[in-house]
Amino acid sequence: MTAQTAFPAPPTAPPSAASEPPVAASGRAGDASAAAPADRPTGPSLSPSRAADFKTCPLLFRFRTVDRLPEQPSADQVRGTLVHAVLERLFDLPATERTPAAAAALIAPEWQRLLAAEPALADLFSTPAGALPDEAALLADFLAGAGDLLAGYFAVEDPRRLEPSEREQLISTVVDDELLIRGYIDRLDVSPAGDLRVVDYKTGGAPREAFEGRALFQLKFYALVLWRTRGVVPRVLRLLYLKDAEVCDYQPEAEELERFERTLVALSRAIERAKSDRDFRPKPSRLCGWCRHQQFCPEFGGTPPPYPEPDAGPSEAAVSPSETEPQVGIASPAGTAPPAAEWLTAAGSAGTGAPAPDGAAGSGAGPIP
């Protein structure tokens, strides 16, 4: 566990960043960090999950981003989206009301919000008449699993002592004069001294230490955007593993983010070359077992669909909050990094994967050690 530093309560809690179901596929109205379409650069763009797709398998990138092949989400991925939505809504409540019981009470209404936005999600639990378990039992098990993940969250954090600065916020910036990098942050905490902590909720289990660097790829992506837009290197990148109730903290440095920026630029250029040459080769690995496009992959005897022509529409998929959930090719780390302070605030008190797909601040006093 990390060391904790007490911060007094902020004057007021920031407004919620959420006003739409978390399954929305584009930037939300009112997002200050989301550039208007007319102002958005016309060059290449990259999100953490799309970058990870290309690193994992260029053909997977093509299927998802160029061909836009449909993918039916798994129950674990949808459960991850549901848990993210509940944790976002939890911080709409007054600090003293952010209890395990309150979070559990949010599960059913947030599930209904998801269904209203994506009615096809109900098909995850459809069964033949008379089959066991039936639809009601499958849904009950699904919702109970969300409750278990929320219990894991409360085991590692006390939301009554936190006032996030931003939640489910789209951030973006341009690097190398033309590359737009963007993504959604689950939560951003800001200390009174201006230190930033990026928090990402993981609903899968904490994996082996060998995958730590791959899991931190997404958070380094966000750290780079924040550094370039705010001039501050985030003090802490935090991964919360809700299934195992574990915390992984990492402290990036400016030189590291500079190298990471060069890596993203090189990756983007490789993607643009692949698009120009229409050359997206498969990269076989043990992750292939979880790929939903095996029927189109030459490694499995399939044939990719005809390459889309330029007039078929934009090839770059819009970044969405669902991209914050683990994707194929992004693993989750185990272990912890050097100690970092908690961003703890509470009104009236002192205080503030494995690579398989798994589902999916306030002000105060004192520096962060």
Image (spheres, rainbow, N blue to C red):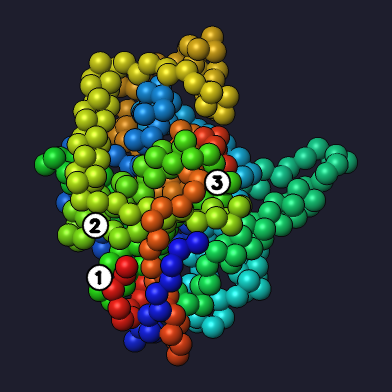
Q: Quadrant of residue 216?
A: top left
Give the structural element (helix, strand or loop) at label 2.
loop
Q: Quadrant of residue 60?
A: top left
Left or right side of 173 for 241:
right
Q: Earlier in the sequence, mark 2 or mark 1?
A: 1
Left or right side of 246 for 191:
left
Q: Residue furthest bottom?
A: 348
Q: Residue at x 32, y 32 (%)?
A: 315
Write down the residue under mark 2: 233
Q: How many neighbours does mark 2 have within 10 angstroms: few (below 14), some (14-19), or many (20 or more)?
A: many
Q: Residue at x 51, y 51 (%)?
A: 202
Identified by mark 2, the residue type is Val
Measured in 3D between alpha carbons, the distance from the residue under mark 1 to the one under mark 3, in whole angstroms, is: 30 Å
Write down the residue under mark 3: 206
Left or right side of 197 for 151:
right
Q: Quadrant of residue 358?
A: top right
Q: Earlier in the sequence, mark 3 or mark 2?
A: 3
**Looking at the rendering, in which quadrant would you find the C terminus?**
bottom left
Name the residue nearer the viewer: 201 or 157: 157
Residue 115, labelled with which disc? Answer: none
Query: Measured from the top left, where is residue 363 in percent x and y?
Result: 32, 78
In this view, 338 is above or below 289: below
Identified by mark 1, the residue type is Gly
Q: Residue at x 57, y 29 (%)?
A: 290
Measured in 3D between alpha carbons, the distance from the residue under mark 3 to the one under mark 2, in whole angstroms, is: 25 Å
Let me know if residue 326 appears in the view: no
Q: Residue furthest top?
A: 301
Q: Residue furthest right?
A: 130
Let me know if residue 254 appears in the view: yes
Residue 194, labelled with which disc? Answer: 1
